[in-house]
Amino acid sequence: METIIGKPGGDGADVVKDSDGANFEADVIKASLETPVIVDFWAPWCEPCKQLGPAIEKAVRAADGKVRLVKIDIDQNPEIAQAFRVQSIPAVFAFSKGQPVDGFVGAQTESQLKAFVARLTGETGPSPIDQALERAVSALEASDHGAASALFAQVLQNEPGNLAATAGLARCYIAAGEASRARELLDGVGEGDADKSEIKGARAALALAEEAAHGSGDVAGLEARVAADAADHQARYDLAVALAGAGRRDEAVEQLLEIVRRDRAWNDEAARKKLLELFEAFGPTDPLTLEARKKLSSLLFS
């Protein structure tokens, strides 16, 4: 496939640096006369700083030299923190033309950091990475797993660790019946990102696929059992799992909703719990998730 994401012009090693009181004037004020400079006030004991630091470095490096990052340890440089009235960390200031122009305090999401950097560089449109991700997601939703896989892989080549691309590629592997490759990819995600929604959703989809593969996949036989005895909740539950594994999502959801409708407490609320697993696997904004959640709520609270 044609490469659609360009490689940065350099490795970005010189756009991130540590500074101190003696060099602040040169590293921040004077440097910002030519290129916007972001100052990250942090401390080794600050847990949120440990999360924000790598994330903001990643966003700055992705800007390909159009913005720089200077890190200030407030324990080693209290006079600078006092000068800027830093009362809580992480605290971030952006400088341009020698003056502070923007900033924030506390943790930020990846998209918020991208937007923060984009405001400084004047590039408010979607990046090539974001454009590739959008195309990849569209391809995945259209079940064009070959195109989606190639696009997600390109994103990861240019931005290793991108969670959306990691989760998307894992879903492509799952759809192709390559559960082991999906698990290997997801197992490589760091502990700090394991609870992110994209990764949890991909893991839920993987668990669903593995359950269907190791369970009873005889859809016709299970349908016959349910037809013969509508109160056979175990057969209906197994049928739902098999249908979900076969990609027949709507039918799987309806079977589980029927169990809840007939006996919501059956098997320690197994049907409700399985529905929640399906919602996580489908994604919170999937139309089927939104519709099924309404139906489930109606059953539970009627």
Image (cartoon, rainbow, N blue to C red):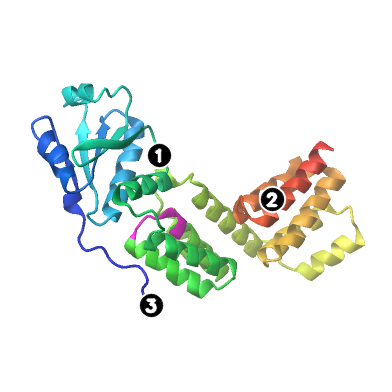
Residue for badge 3: 2
Amino acid type, mark 2: Leu
Residue in the image at 52% along x and 63% along y = 137
Q: How crowded is mark 2: few (under 14 residues within 10 Å), some or many (20 or more)?
A: few
Q: Residue 290 carries which label?
A: 2
Q: How far apart are marks 3 and 2 (CA)?
A: 36 Å
Answer yes or no: is residue 297 visible. yes
Q: Which quadrant would residue 142 be assigned to in this image?
A: bottom right
Residue in the image at 48% along x and 57% along y = 167
Q: Which of 230 and 93 is in front in this view?
A: 93
Residue 21, above or below 300: above
Amino acid type, mark 1: Gln
In this view, which residue lies farthest toward the left? Answer: 22
Amino acid type, mark 3: Glu
Q: What stretch is highlighted in magenta?
A: 159-165
Q: Can residue 162 be found in the magenta stretch? A: yes
Could you tell me residue 114's position as x and y percent? 37, 49
Task: Name which of mark 1 and mark 3 comes first in the sequence.
Answer: 3
Image quadrant where one finds the C terminus: top right
Could you tell me residue 9's position as x and y percent? 21, 63
Residue for badge 1: 108
Q: Residues within 10 Å of mark 3 (few under 14, many from 20)?
A: few
Indicate the secondary structure of the residue bearing disc 3. Answer: loop
Q: Can residue 236 be found in the magenta stretch? A: no
Q: How far apart are marks 1 and 3 (CA)?
A: 33 Å
Task: Name which of mark 3 and mark 2 comes first in the sequence.
Answer: 3
Q: Which quadrant would residue 238 be assigned to in this image?
A: bottom right
